[in-house]
Amino acid sequence: MTPELDTLLRELEQFGKDNDASASSRQQKMLNITRDTGEFLQWQIRALKARRILEIGTSNGYSTIWLALATQALKGRITSLDILPRKHELARANLERAKLSQWVQFLLADAGEFMRKQFNGEFDFIFLDSERENYVGWWADLRRVLMPGGVIVVDNATSHAAEMQPFANLVRNTPGYLSTLIPIGNGELVILKL
Ligand SMILES: C[S@@+](CC[C@H](N)C(=O)[O-])C[C@H]1O[C@@H](n2cnc3c(N)ncnc32)[C@H](O)[C@@H]1O
């Protein structure tokens, strides 16, 4: 990573902390992943050589920068979705600043609607970091759009363990998937499609 990118990431980390401490609603919060989670995502994508990435929950693009670092090295492609126009615009600007925008297609879209229109096996890595109450309803399409051998990483598996439990149980009870909890950052549920 260049010193300039490291400086930008640190600026965004501070922005996220300050913004979220003073935000009056959840929609105004950035709710960024932790830096070690970013490193983990980058590592996973590089290790898996995953080139077709889907991110559900862009926010201001902090996690997208980590995904894009790996994607740049592998000459892959990220599709990153958010439903809030302000966050979508912030993310675009931040990826421009990071000089990584060429690797990302940002879409202002509901993830459920988006996935319904995708082909089977369209993605080989999915980072899921959105509203947790949707995950159970999205599971059928998450499975369908993920290619065999693909991986889904889900944030907040320990920070919001009770909210995540119905989804984590559903995954565990679905034949053909192997999942494990990695205690990095807010806890990452890592799901492999066998
Ligand atoms: C936890 S934040 C994402 C943080 C981001 N991954 C990061 O670490 O920088 C969750 C985001 O999901 C978006 N979101 C909520 N519901 C969504 C939906 N149905 N489809 C797409 N995005 C959604 C929210 O607007 C919010 O920006």
Image (spheres, helix red, strand yellow):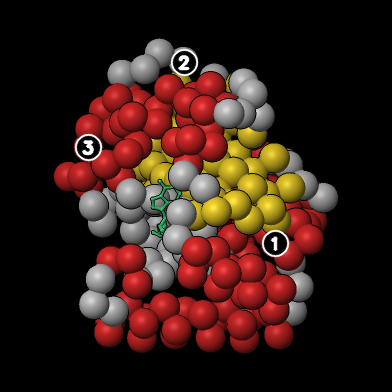
- Numbered-mark total: 3
Counting residues from the N terminus, which is met first, the one under dot 3 or under dot 2?
Answer: 3
Q: Quadrant of residue 120?
A: top right
Q: Position of residue 19 (x, y in %)?
A: 36, 82
Q: Quadrant of residue 73?
A: bottom right
- Label 2: which secondary element: loop
Residue that numbered label 3 is attached to: 165
Q: State if disc 1 and disc 2 touch (CB < 8 Å).
A: no
At 45% from the left edge and 84% from the top edge, which residue is drawn? Answer: 15
Local crowd at mark 1 within 10 Å, few (<14), some, or many (≥20)?
A: many
- Label 1: which secondary element: helix
Give the CA separation, mark 1 to mark 3. Answer: 31 Å
What is the number of the mark on residue 69? 1
Ligand 1 neighbours mark 3 (CB distance < 8 Å): no
Q: Position of residue 181 (x, y in %)?
A: 36, 42
Q: Amino acid at mark 2?
A: Gly
Whether residue 147 is situated above or below residue 15 in the rendered picture: above
Counting residues from the N terminus, which is met first, the one under dot 2 or under dot 1?
Answer: 1
Q: Position of residue 170 (x, y in %)?
A: 29, 25
At 75% from the left edge and 56% from the top edge, which residue is drawn? Answer: 103
Image-quarter location of ligand 1: bottom left
At 42% from the left edge and 45% from the top edge, which residue is drawn? Answer: 154
